[in-house]
Image: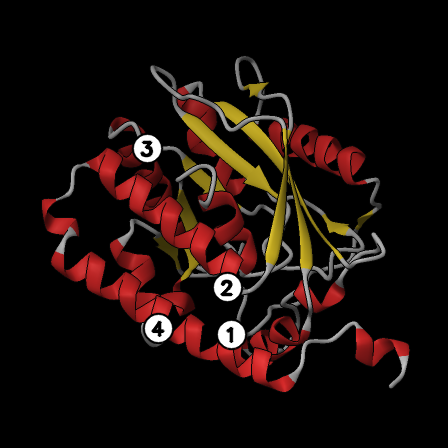
Amino acid sequence: MNSSDRTKTPIPVRLYRAVSVVLHLFAGILEVMLFFPFYGKSRRNRAVGRWSARLLTILNVLPSLRGSPPVVADRAAVLVANHVSWLDIQLIHSVWQVRFVAKSEVRRWPLIGWLSAHIGTLFIERGKGRHAARINQSIQAAFRNSDAVGVFPEGTTTDGTELTRFHASLLQPAVDQRALVYPVALRYLDETGNINTNASYVGDETLTESLRLIFAEKAIRAELMFLPPIDTGGKTRRELAAQAQSAIAAALNLPVSDRKPDISAGPPGALR
């Protein structure tokens, strides 16, 4: 057996993880169907946090938290993060329950799309300016409901070795509402401390292919870094995007690429 084989999980363990993920997904759907209509907002948030944390445990994703998620009271809050994987949302939801903006294709995913919609995800049609205006109105409505909102301003995922330029359009509601913007840096590492690209979800990779790679990993270390918040007062949305991008790039020690991001088939990021 070579060294790469020793770092992978045996096939029976992979099958166990796959079955556990399916059962966990159906358990989440049942809870949403049967109990969410009777839950208050705080109890729903706790349920989402528990479900996400359990999914990470099943996949043996080991979170490492730096900083603390905010206790948001009387001011609107926007989470801005780099985007590597569909695991990003579960990682964040395990410690802070926000309403993510996702591309509309996710709504049509079997089971996952239904579940995402019923926990408050806001969906945007990519490339449609009028729909972007409507999603900004939905973000404003979320603020009025005292919900925090999460966006991935890169517009797509990367493999974790770089950032792409942050787009500013979804930050306009933060400017209008004088919200606090919370930059969050995400990184997935292997057992040696190097970037684990098997945790990423990029290009034409399918969700099934992504799960196969994750199931094969013995463990994935996930770093979740809450950086100092940015006050939107007196700033434009482009200034906010640039400041959040700089903070996350510095925290991850990553370069920022000017390449035009690919439109990927699967990742649930908000696309421009």
Q: CA distance from mark 4 to mark 3?
A: 29 Å
Quarter of the image holding residue 235? top right
Numbered disc 2: secondary structure:
helix
Q: CA distance from mark 2 to mark 4?
A: 11 Å
Judged left or right of residue 245, residue 108 is left
Decide: few, some or many residues near mark 4? Use Cα within 10 Å; few <14, some 14-19, many ≥20. Answer: few
| Whether residue 181 is situated above or below residue 124 in the rendered picture | above
Instruction: Point out the frontmost of discs 4 and 3.
Output: 4
For disc 3, the marked residue is: 147
Which is nearer the N-term, disc 1 or disc 2? 1
Quarter of the image holding residue 77? top left
Numbered disc 1: secondary structure:
helix
Q: CA distance from mark 1 to mark 2?
A: 6 Å
Which is nearer the N-term, disc 4 or disc 3? 4
Q: CA distance from mark 1 to mark 3?
A: 33 Å
Q: CA distance from mark 3 to mark 2?
A: 28 Å
Judged left or right of residue 256, residue 144 is left
| Whether residue 114 is situated above or below residue 3 in the rendered picture | above
Q: Are marks 1 and 2 in contact (CB under 8 Å)?
A: yes
Instruction: Point out the frontmost of discs 1 and 3.
Output: 1
For disc 4, the marked residue is: 23
Q: CA distance from mark 4 to mark 1?
A: 10 Å
Which is nearer the N-term, disc 4 or disc 1? 1
Quarter of the image holding residue 216? bottom right
Tag 3: residue type? Asp
For disc 1, the marked residue is: 17
For disc 2, the marked residue is: 58
Numbered disc 3: secondary structure:
loop
